[in-house]
Image (cartoon, rainbow, N blue to C red):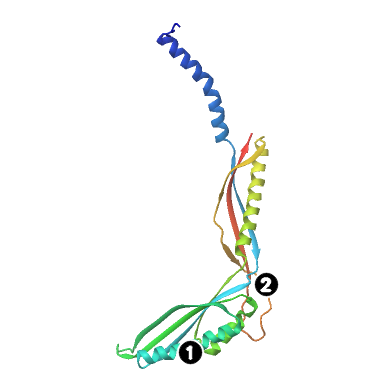
């Protein structure tokens, strides 16, 4: 069998021909991958908060550290019992502190002890009554409320779906204006979302005579960046 050896010039010509046939397809593929329409979609879902998180504290004083701490413990036990009886849940200690007190001349004047617990009220209509019960039991510090929804995750997912629909509508408008045909989704990136309070007086019944708590409404927002194929 004879072996045919191509001259260098012929080999270069062959390589050039193969390259010439390969480049147009590669260029078309790269253009297809680089093409498309990228838009941002945003949507919000509004909902009335249905739970409240509160913090209750007791500060006590005594001539000695032991006396101050003992008095504080006794008062806090009453507060915790009152919170449970009023329907609060997820009660947990936030901090316990004990420190000396001083007068204007920087002289020791006994000790001060503090204890603080957080609690969740899952029926927001009872939040005011829970506050009143805690104060009546001895709480002399109240912080909050932090209002939220129990189905926060579900609300955010609803907002995500609406944000994608919003992005598709924007992409369709851009495609129509450019004489293009909108294709499938090729990429999607989730943005951040968080509940935002809105000034809205919800019609939520509070227990008569209790500390008034207005739940208002919250707006859960979702943002997405979506890329659509276009041709």
Horizontal relation, residue 117 to residue 187: left or right:
left
Mark 1 or 2, nearer chain start: 1
| Residue identified by numbered label 2 | 202
Quadrant containing the C terminus is top right
Which residue is depicted at the point 58% across and 64% down? 196
Q: Where is residue 62 in the image (x, y as percent from the top left)?
A: 38, 92
Q: Which of 1 and 66 is in front in this view?
A: 1
Which residue is depicted at the point 32% across and 88% down? 104
Q: Position of residue 166 (x, y in %)?
A: 65, 50
Question: Which numbered circle lies on residue 75?
Answer: 1
Which tag is nearer the camera, tag 1 or tag 2? Answer: 1
Q: Is residue 34 above or below residue 77?
A: above
- Furthest-bottom residue in view? 63
Horizontal relation, residue 73 to residue 126: left or right:
left
Where residue 24 sits, quadrant-wise, is top right
Mark 1–mark 2 distance (CA, rounded to whole Å): 35 Å
Horizontal relation, residue 208 to residue 55: left or right:
right
Secondary-structure class at tag 2: loop
Q: Where is residue 190 in the image (x, y as percent from the top left)?
A: 56, 51
Q: Nearer the viewer, residue 106 or 24?
A: 24
């Amino acid at each position: 069998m004879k072996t045919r050896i191509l001259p260098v010039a012929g080999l270069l010509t062959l390589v050039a021909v193969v390259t010439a046939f390969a480049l147009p397809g590669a260029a078309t593929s790269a253009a297809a991958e680089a093409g498309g329409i990228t838009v941002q979609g945003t949507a919000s879902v509004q909902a009335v908060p249905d739970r409240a998180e509160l913090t209750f504290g007791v500060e006590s004083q005594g001539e000695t550290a032991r006396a101050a701490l003992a008095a504080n413990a006794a008062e806090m036990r009453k507060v915790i019992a009152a919170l449970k009886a009023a329907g609060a849940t997820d009660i947990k200690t936030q901090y316990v502190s004990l420190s000396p007190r001083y007068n204007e001349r920087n002289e020791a004047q006994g000790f001060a002890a503090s204890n603080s617990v957080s609690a969740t009220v899952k029926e927001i209509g009872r939040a005011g009554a829970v506050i009143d019960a805690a104060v009546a039991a001895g709480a002399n510090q109240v912080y909050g409320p932090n209002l939220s929804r129990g189905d926060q995750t579900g609300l955010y997912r609803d907002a995500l779906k609406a944000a994608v629909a919003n992005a598709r509508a924007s992409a369709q408008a851009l495609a129509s204006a450019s004489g293009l045909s909108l294709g499938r989704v090729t990429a999607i990136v989730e943005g951040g979302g968080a509940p935002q309070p809105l000034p809205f007086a919800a019609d939520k019944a509070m227990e008569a005579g209790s500390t008034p708590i207005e739940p208002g409404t919250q707006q859960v927002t979702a943002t997405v960046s979506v890329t659509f194929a276009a041709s």
